Image (cartoon, helix red, strand yellow):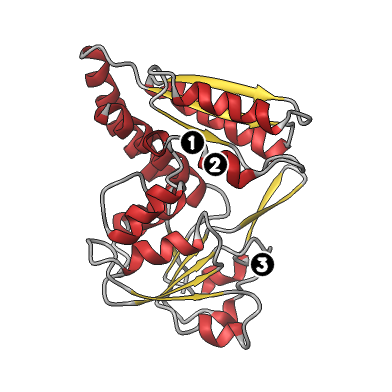
Amino acid sequence: MTARILDGEKLAARIRAELADRVARLSAAGVVVGLGTVLVGDDGPSARYVEMKHADCAELGITSVDERLPADATQAEVEAVVARLNGDPAVHAFLVQLPLPDGLDEERVLLAVDPAKDVDGLHPVNLGKLVMGRPGPLPCTPAGIVELLAANDVPVEGRHVVIIGRGLTIGRPLALLLAMKRSGCNAAVTVVHTGVDDLAALVREGDVVVAAAGRVGLVTADMIRPGAAVVGAGTSWEGRRLLSDVDESVAEVAGWITPRLGGVGPMTRAMLLSNAVRAAERA
């Protein structure tokens, strides 16, 4: 068996085209969509990710605001930038790129973001809306994964999804989203982590497996039920090379699989743009 590819790049391009039409309609109505980023320090992967977001904005006609601070910026300086973006009517949504340098309180910075401008969908107010099933910006990577599975007709409703990883950005919100009674979700969800006994046996029970642990090659072919869908959402950097939680051998067993590049990453960026455009439409 050779797995079908869950092509996030192709789907993200389609989503960006749809968003470009919405951006154009807003522009015709006198509204210029504005997306801001705050980057503190010179972390290489973070800087590259921010640059990609600004390139996406340029493609869609979204105005991007690029706020950069040195690695030795104080807590007060970072929070001052957040406050300025909160109050800027030209910025409809923004994010603070993580991780922040040592010595800065990430939680305090994130709590300072106006929930209405939280483009990542990770503010406690917006996560609370997710728990309650209320409308609000969804966390970008979980939303992108759900869209990617649905667009490829991967059966999810009523099936067993196993998520490896319980992090705030992927594992926890994805479990909430997939368990909800909504189209493309409504699954039985199990969340596991690398410290459980017999991880392989638990993962093997999944009709859909999402690896989001950040450990290179964690998921191997012997851990996957034949025909299951496998999403590699956890990544690690080796120099400038991006590596997946999912070993390449899994493609010989799985029914669907994300590629090492062009799977979840483009979908995360597409969902971030979607949150920004939706914020402008609300405003």
Confirm whether residue 263 shows in the render: no
Give the residue type that dot 1 points to.
Val
Callouts 3 and 1 close, C-beta under 8 Å: no
Say above or below: 77 vs 29: below
- The location of residue 43, given as percent across then percent down, is 73, 37
User: Which label number is shown at residue 136?
Assistant: none
Give the residue type that dot 3 points to.
Gly
- The location of residue 199, given as percent across then percent down, is 60, 82
Read off the residue under disc 1. 113
Between 203 and 27, which is closer to the camera in this rendering? Answer: 27
Q: Secondary structure at mark 3?
A: loop
Give the residue type that dot 2 points to.
Leu
Residue found at x 68% / y 33%: 75
Say above or below: 222 vs 56: below
Q: How far separated are the C-alphas under marks 3 and 1?
A: 35 Å
Callouts 3 and 2 close, C-beta under 8 Å: no
Read off the residue under disc 2. 110
Q: Secondary structure at mark 1?
A: loop
Mark 3 or 1 closer to N-term? 1
- Asked whether, in this view, residue 245 is left or right of residue 204, the answer is right
Read off the residue under disc 3. 217
Residue found at x 52% / y 37%: 112
- The location of residue 201, given as percent across then percent down, is 55, 88
